[in-house]
Image (cartoon, rainbow, N blue to C red):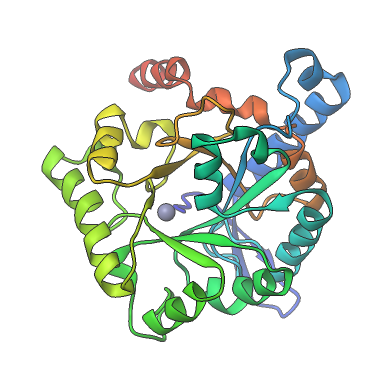
């Protein structure tokens, strides 16, 4: 979400808008990786080619024509993606998926789970009508401090209430969206435990799922996972890139992040596993390497 380097581009209406260099760089890297893995057959050789028996969980953030934050997907693009999912997969709820992990993983075959982080109000205005149209369940991870009455950038209680009776479930994304690995232990407990209690009281329902803020391998650790388990959540999603096999850790589920920089063909390739190679970023080895590199 933080954009450090900007350059400006003249828009059709004459106003100046800023685009991040990081945004363009990300797009180029993804297209190159996708094409290299697709056309060299790398994903077939290494077995990183998507397997329908692995659970795919998609992460969305904002669904809006205004690209802010830069993980935003436009409503038109979102509808196109849902249509593609409808034609090629079946959408199940996160609850159903967790049940499959515990009972019969075979049932997971060909399934996709749709999730949203941060609880933006545009999830109600732009995503919810499309999800309803396709009869797709989804989970939205809320930051408890950001649930406001109405008129803010984030979801209000009346909006949440309406969605929860129409196939949308809610999970916790902490109280204030701080990176848990950087907080003292008692703060981590507060963010994980109290957000559950606050949301349960606001929504008058159980909150069973959790998503780590930012959620890369560097943003939570084994101690964080233990706290999530102790607080009686049934699962937790990270934003480590990838799919989940039968023996996946349901308290560090991998997800496939969908971003502004994904063209439609990139989206299809992501679902097809062409970017699974990117999961190396979240290995402990790569994190260690990164720490050494940044110390130099
Ligand atoms: Zn978040």
Up-down relation of residue 281 to residue 104 (above or below): above
The front one of 130 and 120 is 130
Could you tell me if residue 243 is visible in this image?
no
* Residue lying at 41% horizontally and 18% vertically, measured from the top left: 293
Up-down relation of residue 165 to residue 183 (above or below): below
Question: In screen coordinates, is 265 left or right of 28?
Answer: right
Q: Ligand 1 is found in which quarter of the picture?
A: bottom left
Q: Residue furthest right?
A: 39
How many marks the image carries: the answer is: 0
Question: In screen coordinates, is 142 left or right of 51?
Answer: left
Question: In screen coordinates, is 275 left or right of 170?
Answer: right
Up-down relation of residue 198 to residue 81 (above or below): below
Where is residue 258 shown, x and y percent of the image?
Answer: 63, 50
The front one of 154 and 157 is 157
* Residue lying at 27% horizontally and 58% vertically, measured from the top left: 196
Could you tell me if residue 244 is visible in this image?
yes
Up-down relation of residue 155 to residue 251 (above or below): below
Residue 146 falls in image quadrant: bottom left
Q: Residue furthest left?
A: 186
């Amino acid at each position: 979400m933080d954009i450090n380097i900007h350059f400006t581009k003249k828009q059709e209406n004459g106003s100046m808008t800023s685009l991040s260099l990081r945004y363009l760089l990300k797009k180029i890297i993804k297209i190159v990786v996708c094409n290299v893995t697709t056309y060299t057959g790398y994903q077939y050789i290494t077995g990183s080619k998507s397997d329908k028996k692995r659970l795919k969980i998609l992460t969305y953030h904002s669904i809006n024509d205004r690209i802010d934050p830069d993980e935003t997907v436009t409503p038109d693009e979102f509808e196109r993606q849902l249509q593609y999912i409808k034609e090629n997969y079946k959408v199940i709820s996160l609850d159903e998926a967790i049940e499959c992990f515990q009972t019969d993983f075979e049932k997971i075959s060909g399934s996709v789970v749709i999730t949203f982080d941060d609880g933006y109000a545009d999830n109600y205005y732009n995503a919810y009508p499309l999800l309803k149209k396709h009869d797709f369940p989804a989970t939205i991870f809320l930051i408890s401090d950001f649930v406001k009455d109405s008129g803010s950038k984030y979801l209000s209680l009346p909006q949440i209430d309406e969605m929860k009776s129409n196939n949308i479930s809610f999970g916790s994304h902490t109280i204030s969206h701080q990176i848990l690995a950087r907080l003292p232990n008692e703060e981590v407990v507060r963010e994980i435990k109290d957000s559950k209690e606050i949301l349960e009281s606001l929504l008058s329902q159980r909150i069973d799922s959790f998503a780590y803020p930012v959620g890369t391998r560097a943003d939570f650790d084994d101690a964080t996972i233990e706290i999530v388990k102790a607080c009686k959540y049934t699962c937790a999603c990270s934003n480590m890139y990838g799919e989940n096999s039968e023996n996946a850790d349901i308290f560090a589920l991998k997800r496939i992040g969908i971003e502004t920089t994904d063209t439609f063909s990139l989206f299809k390739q992501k679902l097809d596993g062409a970017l699974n190679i990117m999961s190396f970023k979240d290995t402990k080895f790569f994190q260690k390497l990164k720490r050494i590199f940044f110390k130099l």
